[in-house]
Amino acid sequence: MQPPPESTGDALAECFRLLDELPAAAALSPAFRRHWPSISASLSSLSASLSHPTFPPSAPLLEPLASALSALMSVCSGPPLGHLHTVSLLSSSAASLSQLAADARLLVSPAEGNGSESDGLLSRLRLGSFVSRAAALDSLAESVRSSQPGSCSAAAVSAVAAMLDSGDLLPASRDKAVSVLAAFASSEATCRFLAQESGTVVPHLCRALESGGASAEQACVALESLTASSRDAAATVSARGGVAALLVACAAGTPSSQAAAAGVLRNIAAFPDLLPAFSEEGAIPLLVQLVSLGTPRAQEHALGCLRNVTASDGGEGQSLKVEAFQAGALACVKDFLNSCRGDEPGLAPAFGLLRNMASFRLIAEIAVSATFLSHVVAALGSDEANTRTEAAMALAELCHISSGKARGEVGDAMPRLVWMLEAKAVAERDAAARALATLVAASSSYRALFRKEEMGIVNVVRLLDPAVRGGDKRFSVSVLLGVSQSRRCRKQMVAAGACGFVQALLAAEVDGAKKLSECLGRGKMLGVFPRT
């Protein structure tokens, strides 16, 4: 038998040579008599598969196949071996050839009409030897990256998860499997299927993360997607010491691995019960450093992580705010804001971090003196809803600090906050209402500025409407109470329909609704009645 002209690889040519010579050599050796039927069947199957037009000349199974055939040839032509040694060698070689023959059939099975290409790929992932499965992983990774629909399925994700869970993969194949999971995480078509297998794959991804190297970066990519959608996944990563390993990646990894690792840390920090690991590992100084030195994506994720770490208001939360301030987080945010050009993704978490730290009054005073207010007011005009929302929340914390310059800067925010009350997003409307409630309660000058806004009262009253779903009605009530001493404002409220809305708030026992109702009663006595 001669190799086909197109099969020019040395390994493939050597396998054809051994397949051609072995039957004649085995016929002269009595040792083959017992094992020859099974060996002969495997040889015939291998010959057919290797001769098939679709068989890949560089298939990974060629090297072990040549090794197994050479071992059998040594029994025929080599020096005599002991009986037990010969029997053992023939038995293991027969089993190996049988598995290799099955792998070779899987490599050509799609072209023979035994199923679609993806079905053949899944079969090789589940049933082949480690060599066949390694090749299948390569094919699967390529198909996911190229967004071919055949392999982007729950079955493919499940097969890779089962491979990792089997425990019989070589290190190189394990790294390939982690790479495939990262590709799944980066694809909208498969990330939801990956989440369904999180209980199986997260421990293996944590192991890859601890090992370092290229597989650690791929593990971070996969874990970023998994921990964003699952608290259980985040808790598993934290329980297995993942915070420490992720911090190592943030400190010494490649720019892309730093960004992915910071993204995982941000997701873990979103759960308050997992925050002790951040304190124990000294995460805050390293995250502050990453904001200063990282890529834009790493900065965004590090700022998001610091925002989540400092979000709690309890005793531990206050200590974390102080720790972040002492580590230079406030100065780091200032440098970041000064360096920003346009609506960068990191702006929203930066203002979120500022808002959290400013809830500590001493830090708020320092922030106001450091001219943060100009950045906050400017961000209220951002094209990004998240940035506007976080800036409004930060303003609500900073406007308590009174100074002539601060009042002038905050006054510029009033028209933008009134405009934000008309936003579609509930969070943005709430943030604007909260900032306005804080402003009108803080200073008579702010109340005067609000009264000058033509749509101010009308927009706030609209938020009281029970038909406006979501949102915290208390902030709107507080704004209206803040300006209710003005007869003109009470007339505007009544004319806008506030009386009817307040009755619904009274039934819901919203704080301040009763007092607002009494104030509006005085407006009705002036002869201004609510709309019907």
Image (cartoon, grey):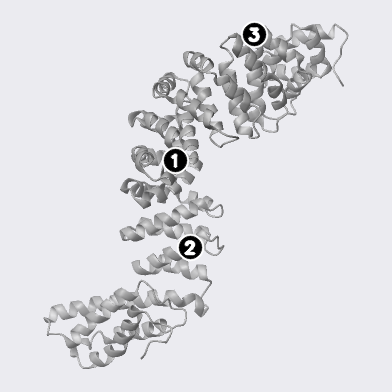
Residue nearest the observer in this picture, 79 or 372: 372
Local secondary structure at mark 3: loop
Q: Residues within 10 Å of mark 2 (few under 14, many from 20)?
A: some
Residue 142 bears which disc, if any?
A: 2
Residue type at numbered disc 1 = Val
Query: In the image, 430: left or right of 497?
Result: left
Local secondary structure at mark 1: helix
- What residue would you read off at disc 3? 443
The span from disc 3 to disc 1 (Cα, nearest Å) is 42 Å
For image coordinates 60% across by 31% down, the residue present is 387
Residue 264 bears which disc, if any?
A: 1
For image coordinates 18% across by 90% down, the residue present is 30
The span from disc 2 to disc 3 (Cα, nearest Å) is 62 Å
Local secondary structure at mark 2: helix
Q: Earlier in the sequence, mark 2 or mark 1?
A: 2
Residue type at numbered disc 2 = Glu
